[in-house]
């Protein structure tokens, strides 16, 4: 694993991620069943454009999304209090070949990661009722484990005044094999498209 030690959300962090598939976008490459996603081509072209322009395309950020970012520190403190684990914040992690990466919300000891979400109250209650990892984040969390080689992710959903939702996620070896194969094919195609664009 290669780690770029920059603060998440900074221009340096955005630059490190530019043109690279990242765990938050792995669902655009592969489905939960390990098959190619219908969003694959669009994501491929977007990353090729980033490589050519050298800039990360701006994405829409709603008020709810900004609130989630603003509350992350509070949520991290609550996790540390409940779990008695300390969280070490990390920048951008990449595979050994630096083809793709992930930005976990922190390292837990030598073996773990944390992924923090601060959704709306209704969404958070839904997570509590379901009592498991929300399927929307399956590829992201498994991708983080693949990139970092860590043994677990503590998925932590937080909303003030309501009990937190925490679930420990272990590696899914069958899915990770499919994910790695799809990532390698995706990155090879991304390189070819980028070269083609540079020649034209």
Image: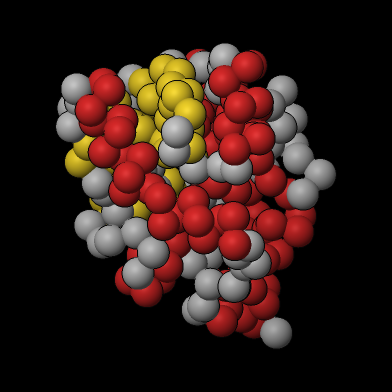
- Which residue is nearer to you in this view: 1 or 74? 74
User: Along the line of sight, which residue is nearer the eye, 50 or 24?
Assistant: 24
| Residue pictured at 71% horizontal, 32% vertical | 31
Left or right side of 198 for 76: left
Q: Position of residue 41 (x, y in %)?
A: 76, 55
- Residue that lies at the very extreme toward the bottom in this rendered image: 200
In the displayed structure image, the side of residue 177 where residue 4 appears, left or right: left
Name the spot of residue 45 as percent of width and height, x first: 70, 64
Which residue appears at 33% of the width and 20% of the height? 151
Answer with left or right where residue 113 lies relative to residue 47: left
Quadrant position of the N terminus in the picture: top left
Q: Is residue 75 visible?
A: yes
Q: Is residue 194 above or below residue 34?
A: below
Give the image location of residue 29, x and y in percent.
67, 43
Query: Which residue occupies the foreground of this view, 109 or 195?
Result: 109
In this view, which residue lies farthest toward the front? Answer: 161
The quarter holding residue 48 reads bottom right
The answer to whether one can see residue 16 in this image is no
Identify the image quadrant of residue 178: top right
Measuring 39% from the left and 64% from the top, which residue is drawn there? 9
Is 100 drawn above or below residue 37 in the view shown?
Answer: below
Which quarter of the rendering shows the C terminus? bottom right
């Amino acid at each position: 694993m290669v780690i770029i030690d920059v603060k998440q959300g900074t221009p340096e962090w955005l630059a490190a991620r530019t043109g690279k598939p990242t765990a938050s976008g792995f669902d655009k490459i592969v489905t939960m069943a390990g098959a190619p996603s219908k969003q694959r081509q669009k994501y491929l072209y977007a990353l090729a454009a980033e490589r050519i322009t050298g800039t990360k395309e701006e994405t829409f950020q709603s008020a709810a999304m900004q609130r989630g970012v603003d509350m992350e520190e509070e949520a991290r403190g609550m996790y540390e209090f409940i779990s008695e684990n300390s969280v070490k914040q990390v920048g951008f992690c990449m595979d050994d070949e630096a083809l793709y990466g992930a930005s976990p919300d922190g390292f837990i000891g030598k073996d773990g990661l944390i992924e923090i979400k601060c959704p709306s109250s209704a969404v958070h209650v839904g997570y509590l009722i379901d009592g498991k990892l929300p399927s929307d984040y399956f590829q992201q969390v498994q991708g983080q484990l693949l990139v970092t080689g860590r043994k677990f992710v503590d998925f932590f959903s937080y909303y003030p005044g309501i009990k937190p939702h925490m679930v420990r996620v272990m590696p899914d070896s069958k899915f990770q094999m499919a994910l790695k194969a799809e990532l390698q094919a995706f990155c090879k195609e991304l390189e070819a498209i980028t070269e083609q664009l540079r020649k034209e």
